Amino acid sequence: MDTETAPTYKRFRPSAYHPSMALTWWMKKPSYLLYILRELTAVFVAAYAIILLLTVRALSQGGEAWDTWLATLQRPGMILFHGFILAFAVYHSLTWFTLAPTALVVRIKDKVLPASALIAVHVAAWVGCSAFIAWVLLSA
Amino acid sequence: MDKTIKIQVRRYLPEKQPDPFWQEYEVPLEPKWGVLDALIYIKDHLDGSLSYRWSCHMGVCGSCGMMVNGEPALTCATFLEEYQPGPIRIEPLANFKVLRDLIIDTDDFMGKLKSVKPWLITDEKRDITDGENRQTPAELKAFKQYTLCINCMLCYSACPVVGLNEDFVGPAAIALAQRYNYDNRDSGNAARHDTLLAHGGAFDCTLIGECSRACPKHVDPTGAIQRYKADGAMEYWKRLIWPKAATAPKNDGIVKQID
Ligand code: SF4
Ligand code: FES
């Protein structure tokens, strides 16, 4: 009932309480935690973008800067960090592809393509692109 | 009484006590009883002051939604046996204002439903003699899933975005908007974009997916919202590049349509 248009109704609604969400809401359910982790992957992907930018900068600064940068990249801490970034990037991509069918409805004639097929196409394209890039880099 | 199970209810009686409190009851563990039956038993035999909503007792009216052990559920379709040995904790639906015991304030939700203009918007003039406005099965299928919503609000309780951002129009309202957007008799998409593209609209959704997991009718509001985001993004750019192209039918009120 609209309390604005029926003010008398307020008599039986002395007050109300509005529970607020705890700051730790995302720890309450595994699905919430997985969601927060998925959002967190963006931080690691961004970190990698910064590393790439620094690489380009080192390249533009000539031989000596490039060599120091390469040495930095080869430190164990840096390699570990790259491992982290890779893990998060893979999780990011997988969650992205598994969510794709929620936004995409592909109709072929009057049949809707099942979600599993859509995910498979996405993952196959991803693996294909990665393999191609790996081939280009490794054969250079 | 053979077997029993404990039920803990979060109660709120503002005229007696300013804060909500927990109260425990013990009810018979009947094999076919839903959580709602336990509440009815409490009201009939143990404590007549307990307030809660229900109507159909068969999962179609959408009024018996509550939090059962922290998860939003239709209490008439949730069985006591599944929660053995108990206790079962029952709370009012999360993310809503609570008026009394298990009764939440639905005004905000109703306002949000209305804000997406959930009625046929068209400039086409139809007369009563034209008869039914027929559709093919394929045309119906384009939006049928979104008509199955029973307004139970479980999706609003499951959604952290609703809890954190009270302006968010929410899952069921966007699914309802899509029910009309994908209806071939309707041409009111542009009018609905005004709500759905604005602050509090579909882009406030961060794709957690909890609404679809909570929905007892498999409406899949998550899907409805993401499909809207694709359409809405197109509309956003269209409005930016060529504002004149986006015009809604002048006739966007159901009342105007009748007279
Ligand atoms: S979309 Fe599902 S969960 Fe949300 S109100 Fe409708 S029926 Fe209930
Ligand atoms: S009483 Fe109607 S849905 Fe539960």
Image: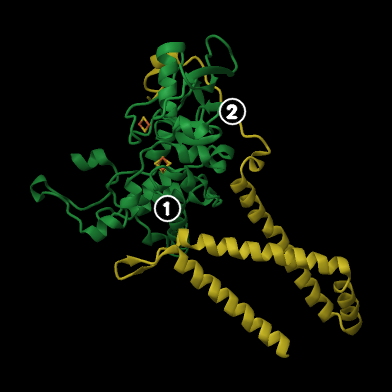
Residue type pointed to by label 1? Ala
User: Residue at horizontal 34%, vertical 51%?
Assistant: B145
In screen coordinates, is B85 left or right of A114?
right
As drawn, the chain in green is: B
Q: CB at mark 1 closer than 8 A to ligand 1?
A: no
Residue type pointed to by label 2? Pro
Chain A hue?
yellow
Instruction: Tell me if I can see residue B48 in this picture.
Output: no
Q: Which residue is mark 2?
A: A19
Q: Tell which subunit mark 2 falls on.
A: A
| Residue A119 location (% of width, % of height) | 50, 67
SS assignment at label 1: helix
Residue A74 got which mark?
A: none
Q: Which residue is mark 1?
A: B224
Vertical comparison of B219 with A104: above or below: above
- Using the rendered view, name the quadrant where residue B138 is placed: bottom left
User: Residue at horizontal 37%, vertical 26%?
Assistant: B54
| Residue B160 location (% of width, % of height) | 57, 42
SS assignment at label 2: loop
| Residue B177 location (% of width, % of height) | 37, 48
Vertical comparison of B190 with B82: above or below: below
Quadrant that contains the N terminus of chain B: top left
Contact? badges 2 and 1 (CB < 8 Å): no
Q: Residues within 10 Å of mark 1 (few under 14, many from 20)?
A: many
In screen coordinates, is B58 left or right of A69?
left
Instruction: Give A26 or B58, whichever is nearer the viewer.
Output: B58
- In the current view of this chain or complex, which residue is farthest to the front? B2
